[in-house]
Amino acid sequence: MARPRLAPDARRAQIVKASMALFARKGFSGTTSRALARAAGVSEALIFRLFPTKRALYTAIIQRTIASVERPYDAPGGDRLPDRDVFLRLAGDLLARVRRNDAFLRLLMYAGLEGHALSDLYYEAHVARLIGHLRRRIASGTRAGRYRAVDPVLAARAFMGMLVHYATAQALFARGRWPDLPVDRVARTFVDLFFSGLERGGRP
């Protein structure tokens, strides 16, 4: 049966989705163009017509993921949201995203271990920006007297560390060991713990 004809953008999206799963299992170095074509159900020639190099395909995966990440503080009026609401939305979004599909988390780990420059692309476009936003909120709250005098960068990284460790452990090690708790419960627990230590008058 002939392969159904898709518009170029739809075909690119199909290839990107299939390739992400393969890169997540085998890494950049361990994934061949033949395997990519087989996973996407297309010819190698078509892949190279849409993505001239394997790096171009890898970059498309990173960029597609960056574009899909929700940033509550970028939405209209997001800068007026209370700090807890922003932290809670970010926590819920990150945990839900990894639970739905941990392929991108695994792909980033491979990229970092292989020393691939594309891990830096995601870090600069999303992680550094996110930590910068959290840092500014924490610093602003400290100046206003709401929060303890802490290093805002370390505090922001500590908050992200809770989320990333939980998501990573659930994806890689939790099979049959730890239950998959509701995302909103996990997010709210981590936010409450974080602000209990950050807010003046909170329990140390």
Image (cartoon, grey):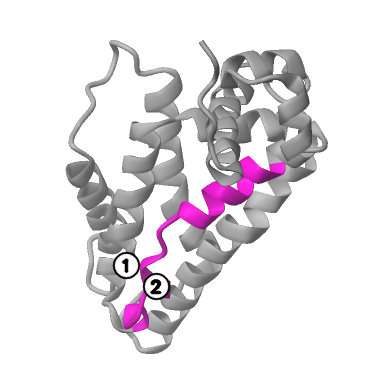
Is 51 part of what is drawn in magenta?
Answer: no
Residue at 46 percent of width and 53 percent of height: 68
Image coordinates for residue 176, horizontal then vertical, percent: 28, 10
Determine whether label 1 and label 2 are within 8 Å by CB: yes
Circle number at residue 73: 2
Is 77 part of what is drawn in magenta?
Answer: yes
How crowded pointer 1 is (Cα within 10 Å; few <14, some 14-19, many 20+) is rated as many
Q: Is residue 32 visible?
A: no
60 left or right of 168? Answer: right
Q: Quadrant of the C terminus?
A: bottom left
- Sequence-wise, the earlier of marks 1 and 2 is 2
Q: Main secondary structure of the magenta part?
A: helix
Which residue is labeled 1 in the image?
86
Q: Is residue 146 visible?
A: yes
Residue at 70 percent of width and 44 percent of height: 59
User: Front-most of 48 and 65?
Assistant: 48
In the rendered image, the vertical position of residue 181 relative to residue 129, given as above or below:
above
Q: Amino acid at mark 2?
A: Tyr
Image coordinates for residue 113, horizontal then vertical, percent: 72, 29
Image coordinates for residue 103, horizontal then vertical, percent: 50, 29
Q: CA distance from mark 1 to mark 2?
A: 7 Å
**What residue span does the magenta drawing correspond to?**
59-79
User: Front-most of 202 and 72?
Assistant: 72
Residue at 59 percent of width and 35 percent of height: 16
Where is residue 118, by image quadrant? top right
